[in-house]
Image: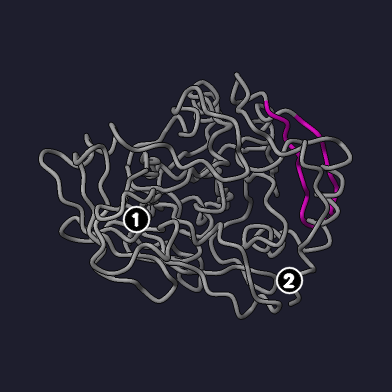
Amino acid sequence: MDLKAFNYDLPEELIAQDPLEDRSSSRLMVLHKDTGRIEHKIFRDIIDYLNPGDCLVINDTKVIPARLMGIKEDTGAAIEVLLLKRNADDVWECLVKPGKKARTGARIVFGEGLLVGEIVDVIEDGNRMIKFHYEGIFEEILDKLGQMPLPPYITHKLQDKNRYQTVYAKNEGSAAAPTAGLHFTKELLEKIKEKGVNVVSITLHVGLGTFRPVKVDKIEEHHMHTETFNISKEAADTINRTRAAGGRVIAVGTTSCRTLESAAADDGTIPARSGDTDIFIYPGYKFKAIDCLITNFHLPESTLIMLVSALAGRDNIMNAYETAVKERYRFFSFGDAMFIC
């Protein structure tokens, strides 16, 4: 498929710069995927579209302060490092800017020496493998020196870093928030559970692969970056019981969707499993695990708009986005939500 088929015009002022004070007061577009019918609601109304016996699947990953500002040890040149994925022995895969100054063997100093990173390899896509040297506990040093890795289209400074976390964030490891979950409050989740909806947690640590621009004209040639996920036996059993009883599996966010679709057997059964995924979902994909999706409004020509187009149909999605622009919805990470059902 042609990349341009997933483009749309978005006025810059519709890119949300700040989270709303009340998470659940964002707008909610309900898109009925079989007909293309659209309803305009408030996010807390999502409870009206969930049925007893459904299963809501949330991603409990927690964003780490993954952006580090340092200097090159030998020249004093400014270097920005974004932590993407942790390997063994304090070696991280990182995105480094500017890359030209970050050759193998270079050392980067952070916090006047509290943390020192040594570039040990440059991998295929240009990312760097960095081994960190420090005294003490890495997470405590990172919490002191690191910044929340807000997307580049958010230019306002975030006053409360917890607003870039879901209320159920638990397992540290993401370089970006699973933003569909930002709309939930603890109170709303309790009401959903009281209605008889099963709420289960899985984990996918969000890297930059989901957000990297597609640079090929034919989307089938795009390759996704790998991300790490975990599905517990308890979560898998609950999801499988839901399907067996005729309930719907509703993914909160494209990260939950990609995790379930990566793990699912051909019959839709979910095993307890940990691993890496580079699944790329675009129109033509046959969904095995999920029935519905809660998501945000995504960037033009992104892999995420391709995923939702696979679920709801490209024409339905492009019409919904055109409608969202006309109705002045707020877009992207701190923006409004869509429920595809």
Query: Which image quadrant for residue 191?
Result: top right
The amino acid type found where label 1 is placed reads: Asn
Where is 143 relative to 171, above or below? above
**What residue does disc 1 label?**
230
Front-most of residues 217 and 248: 217
Q: Residue 242, how many percent across, how many down? A: 50, 50
In the figure, 83 relative to 51: above or below? Answer: below
* Marks 2/1: CA–CA distance: 31 Å
What mark, if any, has residue 87 been given in the picture?
none
Q: Name the residue at the front extreme.
A: 75
Q: Is residue 4 magenta?
A: no
Name the residue type under label 2: Leu
Magenta range is 26-41
| x, y percent for residue 73 | 25, 52
| Nearer to me, 149 or 68 | 68
| Residue 90, horizontal then vertical, whole percent | 19, 55
Is 279 left or right of 42, judged from the image as shown? Answer: left
Nearest to N terminus: mark 2 or mark 1: 2
Which residue lies under the disc numbered 2?
3
Above or below, 87 against 168 in this view is below
Residue 220: quadrant of the picture = bottom right
Under circle 2, the secondary element is helix
Q: Residue at x 27, y 39 (%)?
A: 142
